[in-house]
């Protein structure tokens, strides 16, 4: 399998096509801070909290304080009557990863500037009607609070890119017009999760699996009832990067 390196501009410039995507107003999108519930991506919810609790005395109270909520709201989360809010996810993850967490809205370094990730005016197909742009350009940038991006990936921001998704093959993980952040350093199938790949001149979002012959690649869709797995020659698939975050448009 050919592995791809370089900037997103270099990678996407080679994609062929004749459909020009409409410019997107990325202010319509909110961060989907919770990870997708499917293979390779862990959702931050009550089960996540139970899995990481150590049983330390006062731990639940400390977690509620770190999340910026009172004990009753945390109890509702644990009983299934309240969801972990997107703004609370970094505090939950940080609490269990480091044993501490910053309260919501208080970054580790208050003087640090937000991290800007480029949003490219391209679309990756999550379905049969793939769209490959005839051009690509940075259409916008999304700002991530200091420290939050660190919870998503340790990769340098200059190796990250955000693009749009089109189609329905990755439903319910991704819907048409969602956006995804691509880690362009993750260009082999040693990692679980979703990948942006180029196949047959088209950008696509799929889960990848090596075929039994080890020479072919199976492209899996989460909406596998409508989009069955495809087995294609490995040399025809180029991995652009792994999806490490997704953003969903407000309904």
Image: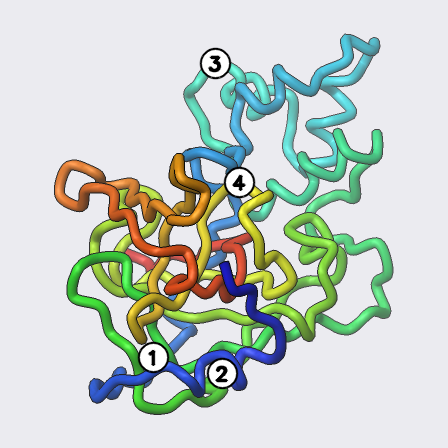
Q: Mark 3 falls on what kind of element?
A: helix
Local crowd size for mark 3, using a 10 Å CA cut-off: few (<14), some (14–19), many (≥20)? few
Residue drawn 84% across the image and 54% down it: 108
Mark 1 or mark 4, which is nearer the start of the sequence?
1
Give the x, y percent position of residue 135: 36, 91
* Residue holding disc 1: 24
Mark 2 or mark 4, which is nearer the start of the sequence?
2
Local crowd size for mark 1, using a 10 Å CA cut-off: few (<14), some (14–19), many (≥20)? some
Alpha carbon separation for disc pair 3 and 4:
30 Å
Which label sits on residue 140? 2
Q: Is residue 220 above or below residue 52?
A: below
Which label sits on residue 79? 3
Of circles 3 and 1, the one toward us is 1
Residue drawn 58% across the image and 59% down it: 187
Q: Mark 1 falls on what kind of element?
A: loop
Mark 4 or mark 3, which is nearer the start of the sequence?
3
Residue drawn 45% across the image and 65% down it: 238
Q: Quadrant of residue 184?
A: bottom right
Mark 3 or mark 2, which is nearer the start of the sequence?
3
Which label sits on residue 192? 4
Of circles 4 and 2, the one toward us is 4
Alpha carbon separation for disc pair 3 and 1:
39 Å
Q: Are marks 2 and 3 in contact (CB under 8 Å)?
A: no
Give the x, y percent position of residue 226: 13, 43
Q: Are marks 3 and 1 in contact (CB under 8 Å)?
A: no
Alpha carbon separation for disc pair 1 and 2:
9 Å
């Amino acid at each position: 399998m050919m592995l791809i390196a370089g900037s997103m501009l270099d990678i996407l410039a080679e994609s062929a096509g004749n459909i020009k995507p409409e410019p997107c107003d990325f202010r319509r999108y909110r961060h989907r801070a919770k990870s997708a519930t499917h293979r390779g991506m862990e959702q931050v919810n009550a089960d996540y909290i139970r899995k990481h609790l150590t049983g330390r005395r006062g731990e639940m109270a400390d977690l509620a304080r770190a999340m910026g909520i009172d004990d009753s709201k945390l109890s509702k989360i644990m009983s299934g009557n309240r969801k972990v809010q997107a703004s609370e996810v970094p505090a939950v993850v940080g609490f269990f990863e480091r044993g501490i967490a910053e309260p919501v809205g208080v970054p580790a370094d208050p003087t640090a500037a937000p991290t800007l990730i480029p949003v490219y005016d391209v679309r990756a197909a999550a379905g049969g009607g793939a769209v490959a742009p005839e051009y690509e350009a940075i259409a916008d940038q999304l700002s991530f609070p200091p420290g939050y991006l660190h919870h998503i990936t340790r990769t340098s921001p200059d190796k990250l890119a955000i693009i749009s998704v089109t189609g329905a093959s990755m439903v319910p993980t991704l819907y048409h017009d969602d956006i995804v952040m691509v880690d362009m350093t993750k260009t082999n199938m040693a990692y679980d999760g979703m990948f942006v790949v180029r196949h047959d001149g088209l950008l696509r979002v799929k889960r990848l699996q090596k075929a039994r012959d080890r020479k072919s690649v199976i492209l899996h869709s989460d909406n596998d009832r409508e989009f069955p797995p495809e087995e294609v020659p490995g040399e025809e698939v180029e991995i652009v990067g792994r999806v490490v975050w997704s953003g969903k448009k407000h309904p």
